Image (tube, rainbow, N blue to C red):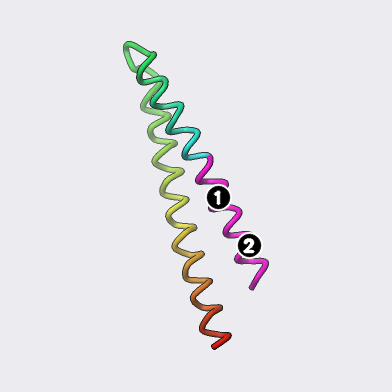
């Protein structure tokens, strides 16, 4: 269970960093690109990454709570 929690935490951090990188790239391109042609794909990927991050965080909290109940 400890390895599963660490693995889930690593995936959550990875998707979080990907989301931050995509969000900053989207904001930069939104300011630079005048006709906003390539922004929609980056916004979609950013939202997808945020959804994956939230999903992994929720399952991580559930795993941690379940482990705490097993120890008690």
Residue at image coords 67%, 66%: 3
Q: Looking at the picture, does residue 52 appear above or below residue 33?
A: below
- Please tell me in which quadrant of the rendered image residue 48 appears: top left
Q: Could you tell which of marks 1 and 2 lies nearer the N-terminus?
A: 2
The part of the chain drawn in magenta is: 1-17
Residue at image coords 38%, 26%: 27
Q: Which mark is drawn over residue 45?
A: none
Residue at image coords 51%, 64%: 60
Q: Which residue is mark 2?
A: 6
User: Which residue ends up furthest to the right in the rendered image?
Assistant: 3
Q: Residue 16, how many percent across, how many down?
A: 50, 45
Question: Considering the image in quadrants, where does the C terminus appear?
Answer: bottom right
Q: Residue 4, how many percent across, how many down?
A: 63, 66
Q: Residues within 10 Å of mark 1 (few under 14, many from 20)?
A: some
Q: Residues within 10 Å of mark 2 (few under 14, many from 20)?
A: few
Residue at image coords 41%, 20%: 29
Provide the secondary structure element on which disc 2 rests.
helix
Question: Considering the image in quadrants, where does the N terminus appear?
Answer: bottom right
Q: Which residue is mark 1?
A: 13
Instruction: Locate residue 70 relative to residue 35 in the image: left or right.
Output: right
Q: Residue 18, how many percent across, how many down?
A: 52, 39
Query: Is residue 54 located in the magenta-colored stretch of the structure?
Result: no
- Please tell me in which quadrant of the rendered image residue 39 appears: top left
């Amino acid at each position: 269970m400890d390895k599963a929690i660490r693995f889930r935490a690593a995936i959550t951090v990875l998707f979080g960093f990907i989301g931050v990188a995509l969000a900053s790239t989207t904001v930069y391109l939104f300011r630079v690109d005048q006709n906003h042609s390539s922004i929609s794909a980056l916004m979609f990927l950013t939202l997808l990454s945020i959804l994956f991050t939230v999903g992994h965080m929720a399952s991580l909290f559930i795993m941690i709570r379940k482990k705490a109940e097993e120890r008690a």
